[in-house]
Image (cartoon, rainbow, N blue to C red):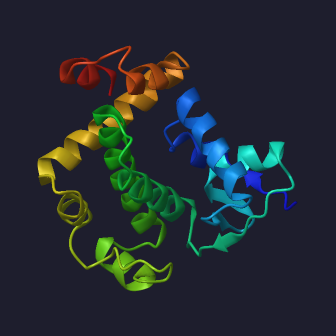
Amino acid sequence: MINLKIDPEFQSQIPPLTDDEFKQLEENILKEGKLLSPLIVWNNTLVDGHNRYAILQKHPEIYFSTMPLRFENREEAVAWICRNQLGRRNLSPEQKRYLLGKQYEAEKKAAKIFRGNQYTLAKKSGGDHGDNHHSGKKTCDRIAEENGVSRASVLRASHYTRGIDIADNLSPGIKQKVFSGEVKFTNEEMSKLV
């Protein structure tokens, strides 16, 4: 079995499955006898498929494959993870808002690493990883269009994401409580945190 590196930042962007969802995934994999979808990796680091990889650790006899993607930097990888997760159906509204804000923040940061702006980012990375997500539009406007929300929603999501990250640093585990609906923050409380 290939030993893949687990990056805590990458893994933390992926909303956890409930116990029932995890058990169902494990049953499906065991029934098939193999993974139907490859694990997504970047430089031998797992980018997508953390739950499936955990199941593979328990059942090394299961056949699986990996699909490497190329990213210029960590921020591009985080942005890809967020976009990929936003396409899934089992997210709570809080998880969607968090991922939308995280994607925006990561793409802005990736653009700065290139010592350019969102337009040079579009030229440098457009299509490199099988995805033409960089269209030359401003990052905020493009993300809003991709997700069917307003520009203001993306900016609010970014603010929300920073607030959740701050709250989770102050009180570890709070992020998961927010995602599960156990704890709710108002916009005013988020503003005070940020």
Quarter of the image for the C terminus: give it.
top left
Q: Residue at x 22, y 66 (%)?
A: 142
Q: Left of 130 or right of it: where is 148?
A: left
Extreme residue in the front direction: 31
162 or 88: nearer the viewer: 88
* Quadrant housing residue 121: bottom left
Quarter of the image for the N terminus: give it.
bottom right
Q: In the displayed structure, would residue 44 be above or below residue 167?
A: below
Q: Left of 194 or right of it: where is 49?
A: right
92 or 64: nearer the viewer: 64
Number of numbered discs: 0
Q: In the displayed structure, would residue 57 be above or below residue 93?
A: below
Q: Residue at x 33, y 34 (%)?
A: 92
Image location (x, y in percent) of residue 193: 33, 22
Image location (x, y in percent) of residue 46: 67, 57
Image location (x, y in percent) of residue 29: 67, 52
Q: Left of 147 or right of it: where is 20?
A: right
Image location (x, y in percent) of residue 38: 64, 66
Q: Residue at x 36, y 52 (%)?
A: 86
Q: Residue at x 65, y 73 (%)?
A: 68
